[in-house]
Image (cartoon, rainbow, N blue to C red):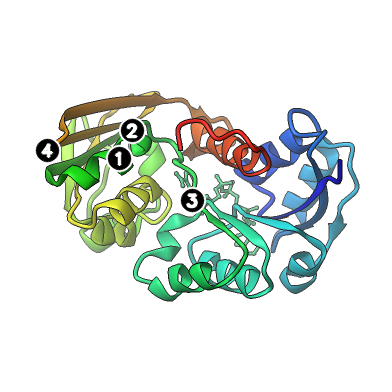
Amino acid sequence: MKKTKIGIVGCGTIGLEVAKAIETRLKNKAVLVAISDIDEIKIDNLLSKIKARPDVCSLKELIKKSDFVVEAASAVVSAGIAKKALAANKDVLIMSVGGLLNVSDIFNAAQKTKARLYIPSGALAGLDALKSAVASGLRKLTLTTRKSPRSLEGAPYLKENNIDLSSTKQEKVIFEGTAAQAIKGFPKNVNVAVALSLIYPSLNVKIIVVPQLKSNIHEIEAEGGFGKMFTRTENMPSPNNPKTSYLAALSAIATLEGALSNVKIGT
Ligand SMILES: NC(=O)c1ccc[n+]([C@@H]2O[C@H](COP(=O)([O-])OP(=O)(O)OC[C@H]3O[C@@H](n4cnc5c(N)ncnc54)[C@H](O)[C@@H]3O)[C@@H](O)[C@H]2O)c1
């Protein structure tokens, strides 16, 4: 069987896990042909952990060489990567989903090409059921995210509002608002909020800081014609990046595996 040629943009935490999976779990279906990153150290690190020797190239070259593009870089560039890949009729998986908010022409572009746009469920349980539930009409959908001060470090919202989390002793709500406001204030922390808001734009997001918390916790509460739903995901952060839950990297791999398979479960 012909293997699907994969290109990865972003050789950090998620990019590395996807690259490793391509030569283990996905080895009969996929081959890593190209990688791209703005940081040479990240490229060298990824190459030192895999056997394959993909081309290190520009985004343009990567799209040309690949059948399937995996974006694991940044919300600043994810929309541009999706547009360019789709325009070249290449399937594309976007991890930095925050960058797709309010860029509706991407969704229109995806409808007009043969290529597919994949948005993984990330570090969140429940997206599958919500996709079904939304047709029944929702009365309520909230996402409550609990994070440690360390995983929120550097968030623009904290700086803009002079919030210093270093001396936080008790659990505290630090943000409540829409998904658009949440991703603007916490661009590296709440991609899951944007994924949910693509299904239900009136989503309410709450971010709670919890001192000493070891995991990233997401809770979804929904009510509607379908009934009631509550999910809670306690995520272990990736060792190299406390902002990224390990499950997010695994969701990229599972989505890629699903895309390459004729059997679709839970979609
Ligand atoms: N959808 C989700 O649920 C979810 C969950 C976690 C992380 N994310 C997002 O996925 C992305 C990757 O996460 P990560 O943990 O691997 O981050 P990371 O910081 O570990 O790695 C990102 C890599 O991308 C590179 N990069 C940055 N800008 C680039 C550009 N313009 N072109 C090429 N490379 C570039 C960086 O140098 C780095 O090597 C981030 O945007 C993150 O916010 C999404």
Does residue 39 appear in this view? yes
Chain-order first, disc 1 or disc 3: 3
Does residue 170 appear in this view? no
Is 227 positioned to the left or the right of 145 in the image? left
**CB atoms of marks 1 and 3 within 8 Å:** no
Number of numbered labels in the structure image: 4
Chain-order first, disc 1 or disc 2: 2
Chain-order first, disc 3 or disc 4: 3
Residue beneath label 4, please?
225
**CB atoms of marks 1 and 2 within 8 Å:** no
> Considering the image in quadrants, where does the N terminus appear?
top right
Is 135 positioned to the left or the right of 87 in the image? left
Dot 2 amino acid type:
Gly
Query: Which mark is drawn over residue 132?
Result: 1
Dot 1 amino acid type:
Ser
**Secondary element at image label 4:** loop
Residue beneath label 3, please?
119
Q: Nearer the viewer, mark 3 or mark 4?
A: 4
